[in-house]
Image (cartoon, rainbow, N blue to C red):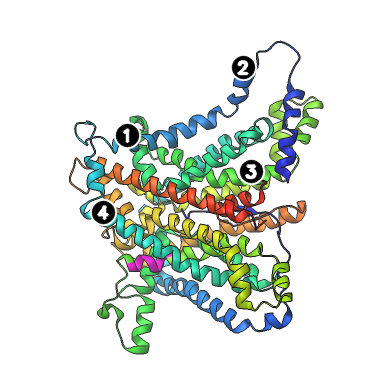
Amino acid sequence: MAEVATQAAAPEVQTSGARPGRVSGIVRGALRWAGVLPFGAYVALGLAGPTIAIAVAAFQDSNTNAATFSNMDAAVHGTYFTGLQNSIELSLVSAIVPGIVGVLVAYAIFTAKRGNVLRRVVITASGVFANFGGVPLAFLFIASLSTTGVVTGWIKDVSSVDIWNHGFTLYNVKGIFLAYLYFQIPLMVLVIMPALEGLRPAWREAAQNMGASTWQYWRYVGGPVLFPPFLGCLLLLFGSAFSAYATAEALTGGTVALTPIQIGALLNGNVVAGQQNLGYALGLIMVVLIAIVMIAYTILQRRAARWLR
Amino acid sequence: MAAITSASEASAQAPAPGAPAAHRRSWPVWRWAVLLIAALYFLIPLYAGLQFAGLKAFTQVTSYPQFGSAFVLSLRLAAIATVLTLVLMVPTAVYVHLRLPRIRRLMEAITILPIVIPPIVLIIGVLKVAPSFLIGTPDLLGLEYVILAMPFAYRSLDVGLRSFDVKTLVEASNSLGAGWPTTLWRVVIPNLRTAMLSATVLTVALVLGEYTMASLDNFQTFPVWIVNFEQNSGNVSVAASLLALFVTWLLLMLIVTLGSRSARKHGGAQVQLFSVSTRQASQTVGEPE
């Protein structure tokens, strides 16, 4: 594609730009890198530096800076372990449920014709809703499902049941899950769509010509082709839920035991002093987990690329 | 991670699924049920928000003194982040495209990193290492928002650079005697206008909605104000949320419209509101291994 063309043409750029003379190749090479120097410096200072600082501080004592494993130890025990557990569970459920719903929605519009109005509306709306998290989302759910919320009122009017008297609450992990669906489902629609579009009609026709039923087509052709990208998209959704902070914080006021919230509390000085480095340890664990998830995602996408192109 | 996402999808890989008509007719009930339930789930909270806030709250939002300062702070950060993003990323993306095409994969990997490192983790690291003259000022946030916006900005620009023949245009310009600044300003940037605009819009939308970093840095930007305000009046917070939402939506719809217009003009890749990861995915998918 375009990439190949440019890459193939690249050496030509170099030679056409080279003046005859005895400029050392090393100097020339170094000069060529100078163009990306500002960018490199910015990333080093704004991204790499802070990340390395966290990785180092995670293994230092908060007061003496002496090397220690105690932060890491504390991070995987007690309330912080519960926080990690809750975060991972919430992210898993917030990946699997919206993942399945998202595939259904995507498939529902996928069967419509390209250029169909409904299809375009759903895709555009997904683009907008997938970008909608954070504080405003929390407040929409407070407006809907808090004790005085509009939807709570409807349910009370219809069935004379106050859900808040029957064990429902918006301000825990389940409430956060309900809110996360709001950006996770559209995100799934967007990320799975290219994979669905990669399913060639010819495969289905071939299967039908050979007498395959719809079930057999999905069991032996469509399913196996879609499975790696589906799994990849679930990982992406997992990462998205795992690193989210604003919605949960605004919804629960920081009262729920999730790792990002705990990091915020540790570093905001709301917790006993001398524990900042525990926050860094938790941060490092988050980064490592998300890095693993993203690597797995990339591998699955590579695998998917074999069929879907 | 599900922050502002953008990208473009390479044009259709496959034509419309040619399912036989008989087959298609058997779907509608199932299809409509799924879409109806989804539509209800997405529209009810919006309606509930409008009703919960009440019309009066919308007029009240702007009359609170701190609204003004919070909103101005958010706008200021958006301006800083946008200018820095363009000044840093446009020359870098063009340079990589022309002179160092072999590090394009590396650039993609680097610019995706801010997605791997959650904002909550990044900000605590930043506050740990930032020099003291930056710690006390909100401009530090503006500097970091450049990092947060990088995945989206870089991808927008990358898509833009792929959509026209930069190399030929630049060589033509150079052989006509134009120097690098002239070439960049009068040849490259005019062709990159749509991409730069979408990078700008994405950066602005991201900054206006960013809560995590601002709240940990203890500066009252607009989203932080909304949360702090909740203690006083829930419905004003809901009204402010809806306002924030509509502004963001307008911005994002702008990209979609511009994208499809430029796609029509160039007949090439269509810019859509897609997740940045999709973009990466579709690139991985689309590239020869």
Q: Which residues are magenta?
A: A174-180
Residue A56's label in the rendered image is: 1
Chain containing the residue with disc 1: A
Chain containing the residue with disc 4: A
In space, the residues marked 2 and 1 are separated at their CA atoms by 34 Å
Q: Are marks 2 and 3 in contact (CB under 8 Å)?
A: no
Instruction: Say which residue label 3 marks.
Output: B158
Give the x, y percent position of residue B87: 57, 35
In space, the residues marked 1 and 3 are separated at their CA atoms by 34 Å
Disc 1 residue type? Val
User: Which residue appears at 41% of the width and 41% of the height?
Assistant: B141
Magenta residue check for A280: no
Dominant SS of magenta comes to helix
Instruction: Say which residue label 4 marks.
Output: A81
> Is disc 4 in the same subunit as disc 1?
yes
Disc 2 residue type? Ile
Chain containing the residue with disc 3: B
